[in-house]
Image: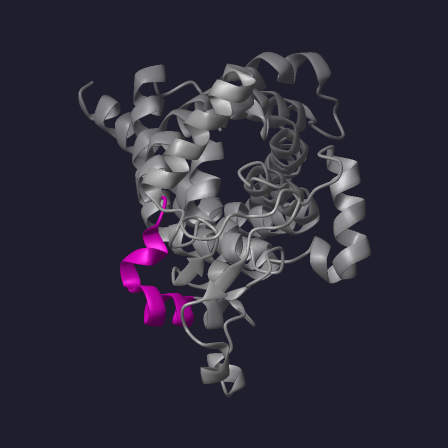
Amino acid sequence: MSNTTTSSTEKLLSACGGALVTSLMVTPMDVVKMRMQTQNVYNAMCCMAFNNCIKHGLQSTRITRGQPLLYECAIPLSSFTTKATTPIFKSTLDGLYKIMKYEGPTALWKGLSPALVMSVPANVIYFVGYDYLKDIIQPIISTQATDYSPLIAGAVARTLAVTIISPIELFRTRLQAATAVHDFKHVMEGVKKMVLQDGMQALWRGLPPTLWRDVPFSAIYWMGYEQMKYALESHYDGLGELQLSFLSGALSGMFAATITTPFDVAKTRRQVDAGREIPLLKDTRVPAILRQIYRQDGIRGLFSGLTPRVAKIGPSCAIMISSYEMGKTFFSSRKASTF
């Protein structure tokens, strides 16, 4: 991507437009992914599958200290007589169907507001920062054989963006994984309680696992994107800028998402577990979380939610990068027409 024909303000507007469109289109997949990654963690899995469960011990029964909180499915488990009606999500499509059936279509956009608040500034910092850093780094480290500036610029830009929006990401993750007893109000109260107990640094509690996931992802994504775009340009002359950006973004995004899925599972488990009165994680460091997940669920557990993650990130990367490039092309063409 080039910085020669568009100003920083024009890039900012392009990134904002892309972030808005992307969030609206891919949030349902993010909700399904979040539920699939956490549905096996709690005693009553239907509570993670549906916003329809009852939490015992809140009013009449006092919970014994050291014992896990008890959940009972408001939909009797005996009523789920077939695989099609089991409370556990068997696949991405199964998750989409069951959320719409038991919670309504609007539940698929749960967490959209914090997603929008998070994605707009994050993508502005990320994309504009990537362009800026790449132009600085490229003359220094590039060789005649390979240009490694996308790898470094992508990693650094993502580190800055993730650090700034980490508190919003924490809230969004908890909201999307919430059950009926943990709606917006309860999630907000939980975050406030966490800040009172542990201080403001608690809002960045999920930052290390997020960096473990996002920094490698961004390095792989941008390196793959630039290489894929160059290859497509070399072999397919008929493709336009929009098609090149869309295909390169989708393919590179899906590959990077697959490689970094275990870190995404660890991040989700840690952020959701932090809101529990009795945490299930013995050690909150990322390597320890990955080992615990592997012991409990094997390789399948490390890659839980892979399909909705790839189904979200592939289109997300494609839409975001093509919208960003289209926005820059639009401003460039307008600028050219005035001369």
Q: Residue at x 46, y 51 (%)?
A: 30
Q: Is residue 303 left or right of residue 163?
A: right
Magenta highlight on residue 168 = no
On screen, residue 89 above or below 166: below
x then y, percent, for residue 63: 55, 48
Nearest the eye: 69 or 38: 69
Magenta highlight on residue 108 = yes
Q: Residue furthest bottom?
A: 81
Could you tell me what secondary structure mostly forms the magenta stretch? helix
Q: Residue at x 71, y 20 (%)?
A: 142
Q: Say if residue 128 shows up in the picture.
A: yes
Nearest the eye: 141 or 318: 318
On screen, residue 68 above or below 197: below
Nearest the eye: 58 or 153: 58
Which image quadrant for residue 186?
top left
Q: Say if residue 324 shows up in the picture.
A: no
Q: Residue furthest left?
A: 338
Nearest the eye: 141 or 236: 141
x then y, percent, for residue 75: 41, 73
| Picture quarter with the C terminus | top left
Bounds of the magenta segment: 96-111
x then y, percent, for residue 189: 39, 32
Q: Residue at x 51, y 77 (%)?
A: 86
On screen, residue 223 above or below 308: above
